[in-house]
Amino acid sequence: MADLTTKLAGVTSPNPFWLASAPPTNTGGQVMRAFEAGWGGAVWKTLGQPVENVTSRFGALDYAGRKIMGFNNIELITDRPLETNLKEMYEVKKRFPKHALIASLMVETREEWREIIKKVEDAGSDAIELNFGCPHGMCERGMGSAVGQEPKVLEVITGWTKEFAKIPVIVKLTPNISDITVPAAAARRAGADAVSLINTIKSIIGVDLDQFVPYPTVDGKSTNGGYCGPAVKPIAMHMVGAIARKNGNALPVSGIGGISDWKDAVEFMMLGAGTVQVCTAVMHYGYRIVEDMIQGMSDYMDAKGFRSTSELVGRAIPNYTDWGSLNRRHTLLAKIHQEHCIGCNLCVVACDDGGHQCIDLNPEFRADTNPTNINLHRTTRKAPIVREEECVGCNLCSLVCPAPGAITMETVPYRPAYGSVTDIKLNGPRAGH
């Protein structure tokens, strides 16, 4: 059976599933319930000078019947007294000594960093995470993403923390930057033990069309917030992978961004993450989702013959390359399988209007109007036809097709997509139109 015990930058946890610094890690009672449910670690909601938060503070984007595909928040760091948080951290670590407890921190001056690091170390924290990513509220005060977007400042402050800390230092990076590897390099130069990413993306989730106010609304006004949830996963994976490609295992990574199940976690780890942090999915479904995450990852690792989570980390990086290094002689063609086609013709529309105009309606096509006459329907219905000589293998048709197995992409011997450049000409109407 696979061993899910994980080690990141010297911090050991029973599994790679950590809670991200957010409302689910706001109190000791919450973190203890999370550990009881099976979470391997938790990054405490960011500590610093307590703030007064606003209401409302959350907004969500639903898509195609799925709730909270994207999530937006304008909540800031802890609004609870520092001493209360420290006392609860101590109690959590005493009760769960084998679980990873990380203190997320955000203060301003060198002396404030010295003081708060000493306090969280005394409370039993296994590591500290520097919140250099918050894209609203705190950045207007010169903290959060205001630091993460300035590599030189990030390097200086990280250097302070490494000077003061006896425990590992993790730098949390903002995605609101053009090249994530630049601040990651600054963190590494300053001696950071690891980085975590991504923090939330600066955003506006929507606008109330009756009140003319962006969401979430606070007494008739609003502001930009931080975007997270399943919708940001592709962006997060790109940034995690970019750091792993550049640094290999020299800079450990804790991956964050839209992770909702074990498959998401494995994908992040194969792109270089040693642990994963989860927030939105827990706010949506609760702590117990970790049970399926643990079981799913364990089953997957057993099936693939992986004995430890370290074997997953960076597994996909050798296959992640620059566009110019891709094999342009590799050729795929679409194949439509009549026995699985349901006759919706979405592939025809998509190919004609958004693709390469190489799928025709079969002239013999007839959708049976009598749903009870199944045999007639099966014997007379014809599927659309791919003109293979013009198919470029883009796979748009297979992506829009709602019928499993109806369209497959098959490897064929190499041929130029359009023949020679001089052969290109405007095509007339499609057969069957």
Image (spheres, helix red, strand yellow):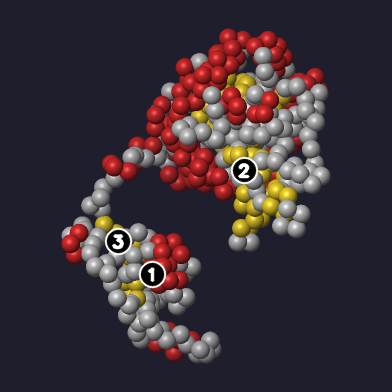
Which quadrant of the figure has residue 168?
Answer: top right
Mark 2 or mark 1: name the one nearer the start of the chain.
Answer: 2
Left or right side of 221 for 177: left
Q: Residue at image x 35%, y 37%?
A: 318
The image quadrant where one finds the C terminus is: bottom left
| Amino acid beneath label 1 | Asp
Q: Nearer the viewer, residue 343 or 269?
A: 343
Q: Nearer the viewer, residue 395 or 412?
A: 395
Instruction: Identify the residue position indicated by label 3 in the image.
Output: 392
Circle 3/circle 1 CB separation < 8 Å: no
Q: Nearer the viewer, mark 3 or mark 2?
A: 2
Left or right side of 194 for 80: right
Residue found farthest to the front: 212
Circle 3/circle 2 CB separation < 8 Å: no
Instruction: Identify the residue position indicated by label 2 in the image.
Output: 203
Q: Residue at image x 45%, y 29%?
A: 181
Q: Nearer the viewer, residue 394 or 411?
A: 394
Q: Could you say where residue 404 lies in the image, as x and y percent from the top left?
A: 46, 67
Q: Could you say where residue 189 lies in the image, as x and y percent from the top left?
A: 47, 17
Q: Judge the density around disc 2: few (<14), some (14-19), many (≥20) Cα neighbours within 10 Å.
A: some
- Label 3 to label 2, Cα distance in Å? 36 Å
Q: Nearer the viewer, residue 195 or 1?
A: 195
Q: Could you say where residue 209 lies in the image, as x and y percent from the top left?
A: 71, 57
- Residue 187 visible in the displayed image: no
Left or right side of 333 for 413: left
Q: Residue at image x 80%, y 41%?
A: 55
Instruction: Identify the residue position indicated by label 1 in the image.
Output: 352
Q: Judge the density around disc 1: few (<14), some (14-19), many (≥20) Cα neighbours within 10 Å.
A: some
Query: Could you tell me which secondary element the residue under label 3 belongs to?
Result: loop
- Label 2 to label 1, Cα distance in Å? 34 Å
